[in-house]
Image (cartoon, rainbow, N blue to C red):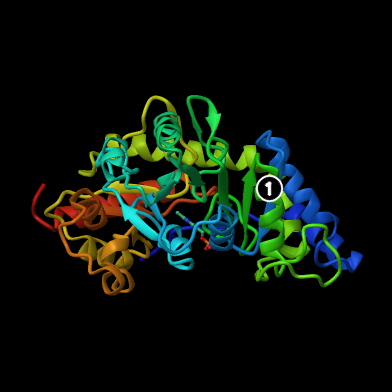
Amino acid sequence: MSQQVPLAKPDLGKLEEQYLIEVIRSNQLSFGPMLHAFEKHFTKRFQIPYALAMNSGTSALHVAVKALGLKQGDEVITTPYSFVASANCLIYEQVKPLFVDINPENLNIDIDQIEAMITPKTRAILAVHIFGQPCNMREIMRIAKKYNLYVIEDACEAIGATWEGQLAGTFGDIGVFAFYPNKQITTGEGGILITKHKHIYELGNSYRNQGRSISNEWLLHERVGYNYRMSDLQAAVGVAQMERLDEILAKRNQAAKRYIQLIEELRVPVSLPKVAKEAYMSWFVFVVLLHEKVSQTRVIKKLSACGIQSKPYFPAIHLQPSYKSLFQYKQGQFPHCEAAATRTLAIPFFNSITEEEQRYVLQSLKEAIKTEGIS
Ligand SMILES: *Cc1c(COP(=O)(O)O)cnc(C)c1O
């Protein structure tokens, strides 16, 4: 009870304040130089020609689907083990998600099951780099090429992660990142789409701004678009966070490595998702796998009584009431995803977490598991 350890905590400081004040004093709160600077950070860091910042990761995913022209009757292969937004962006356009079960070791889509799912209606693969570990993008790109499919990378949890040294988000036709407060970097709310294709950039730019004409003629709307714009106030925080990205990723890497060591040292009876040797992980959350006989709900309650916040990450998308009612999914259809959903637990993880806090979390977790009576 002595301590309070939250699940996540944003890391905002003087630089964020300074840029925010700059925007406030500039009177340019939308489509100003700060938004441009934020996008520039992405094109530079990812060595990619185009970036479109938006008001959420979900908006950026939706624009990705629109810009690729995906529509009713099309199918897109994706994972049921994710934040619901990665499938919702398809539903918005009446595109059918074709869920493929996950690899139980790394919790990403099971590459070996993808090809068998492809039908003549399949148009794209939407790969999610779960918890910051990239999917095997080499294989996904090979399959996409063979079947002539688009690739969207939901890299919302994976900024800075690499597969065989290449940055997640730069393999496919479109990569998307998100900046909700629990993400590696935040703008309060926000997202960004990156692409190497000029036509996707132009269409995406139009869709995020009410379908404005590509020539940007004043109030000429060529298509029905959205207001998915990011304000310069958000971008100001984003620019500061991007300038600090390497520092932030290093801190998270350090904290994650410390958790891994401490789990061993304290003999906490949990296992960890495996990181492939080709993958460099960008740590989004820290997730442990409980023994299958341990109750996730009871462990969360017990940790909460110790002032420690923890959450089940992620529940299976196909078993969400919204998806069950749309597609009549049933328990048992994606067994690895369902097993992971009942076993994975996110424990407190943020840039400034101290070793003392981590020890406290793990000791409390060990204690909570012990009272379950299985280890
Ligand atoms: C955070 C996240 C998103 C986007 O979420 P927003 O809250 O809309 O920014 C999309 N997909 C995944 C996998 C995410 O974790």
| Number of residues whose C-alpha sits closer than 10 Å to that of mark 1, classed few (under 14), some (14–19) or many (20 or more) | few
Q: Quarter holding the N terminus?
A: bottom left
Q: At label 1, which amino acid type do we have?
A: His
Q: Position of residue 13 (x, y in %)?
A: 70, 55
Horizontal side of 246 relative to 20 (left or right) equals left
Q: Nearer the viewer, residue 304 or 3?
A: 304
Image label count:
1
Q: Position of residue 188 (x, y in %)?
A: 62, 64
Q: Nearer the viewer, residue 67 or 334?
A: 67
Image height of 12 relative to 327, above or below: above
Query: In the orientation shown, which residue stands out farthest toward the left?
Result: 374
Q: Quadrant of residue 33?
A: bottom right
Which residue is located at x 26 percent, y 41 percent? 116
- Which secondary structure, mark 1? helix
Which residue is located at x 44 percent, y 64 percent? 72
Horizontal side of 339 relative to 346 (left or right) equals left
* Residue 34 visible to the viewer: yes
Horizontal side of 49 relative to 166 (left or right) equals right
Residue under label 1, please give it: 199
Q: Quadrant of residue 95?
A: bottom left
